[in-house]
Image: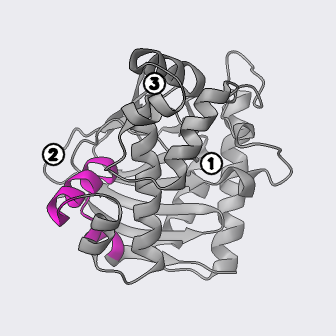
Amino acid sequence: MSRALAVFHGRFGRATVYQLNRPFNIHAHREGHLIFHVGGMSACIDVSDGHYDLTETSVVAVNPWEPHNFLPTDLDGGAIFFVLYVNAEWFAPDASGSDRLRFGRTQFRRTPALDKHIRRTAALVCGAPSLSSLDSELRRLIDICYDESWQQAEIARDPRAGGVTDFRVRKCIKMMSESPGAEIELDAIARESGLSRPHFYRLFRVQTGVTPNLYLNTLIMEQALEALVASETPIADIGFDLGFSSQSGFTRFFAANVGMAPTDYRRAAKVLRA
């Protein structure tokens, strides 16, 4: 079973070290994130339309809202991955929108200096560091990876491009964000926005890059993660609050999107406060 070895939530986002041996469902994150293989057998990850190897010689960077899923090679022991989920406002506090956080390419080489920095920072995460030491190391690592992704990019692009422009899709997102839960009926949201079901699904994907279901699942996961680390609410109650009819249903949903049970995630999670 996949498990969390170390999880830190903070102003920067999340810093995690996972032992993973099970595939995920296709999912997405509001944050950009970086995936580093640090031990065990290599694995693969599908990001949008690309297929990438997760090895100790490269970094995989996933931009906000890019659909992706994890495909392990070792289904017994699994492998160790250091994963950073980066809040756009922490990464670029002067940016006007979250689209500013975009990496230049999905996969890029780990130089010897970058590899050393990755392993030092992963060790800090596993060693329960102080806030000050982890904060500075994370910022340096993220900045280096961002620069490397653009230096190795084949085609430069405007990192601020994109965004939801259609007012009907913005209305749908607002309704989903106000009370995200598994009981939300997307067809009803489409009708409220004056769209037929096929038009709603097609327009939503064009505007956001993901399906309405995947977008809603992301919002639900954000609520679940926050409740797990910021409260002592029983896991069954968290699931019920998010619209699941049973704790087992919530656990299956969580494991399919995070790779482990919510009890395991909560056990490893710590919150770093300034």
Q: Which residue is mark 1?
A: 114
- The overriding secondary structure of the stretch rendered in magenta is helix
Of the two numbered discs 3 and 2 in the rendering, the one whose residue sits closer to the viewer:
3
User: Magenta residues?
Assistant: 245-266
Quadrant position of the C terminus in the picture: bottom right
> Vertical placement of 27 versus 260: above or below?
above
Query: In terms of sequence position, does the residue under pointer 1 or pointer 2 come before the other?
Result: 2
Q: Secondary structure at mark 3?
A: loop
Question: Left of 6 or right of it: where is 267?
Answer: left
Quarter of the image holding residue 254? bottom left
Amino acid type indicated by mark 2: Leu
Of the two numbered discs 1 and 2 in the rendering, the one whose residue sits closer to the viewer:
2
Instruction: Give the residue furthest to the right.
Output: 94
Query: Is 26 in front, or is 242?
Result: 242
Is 256 magenta? The answer is yes
> Vertical placement of 206 versus 111: above or below?
above
Whether pointer 3 and pointer 2 mark residues with C-beta atoms closer than 8 Å, the reply is: no
Question: Left of 53 or right of it: where is 122?
Answer: right
Percent from the top left, x then y, of residue 71?
28, 36
Residue 48 shows which numbered tag?
A: 3
Is 242 magenta? The answer is no
Percent from the top left, x then y, of residue 21?
22, 49
Quadrant position of the N terminus in the picture: bottom left
- Tell how many labels: 3
Residue 75 shows which numbered tag?
A: 2
Amino acid type indicated by mark 1: Leu
Percent from the top left, x then y, of residue 115?
56, 49
> Vertical placement of 54 versus 19: above or below?
above
Q: Residue at x 57, y 28 (%)?
A: 208
Q: Residue at x 44, y 22 (%)?
A: 201
Q: Residues within 10 Å of mark 3 (few under 14, many from 20)?
A: some
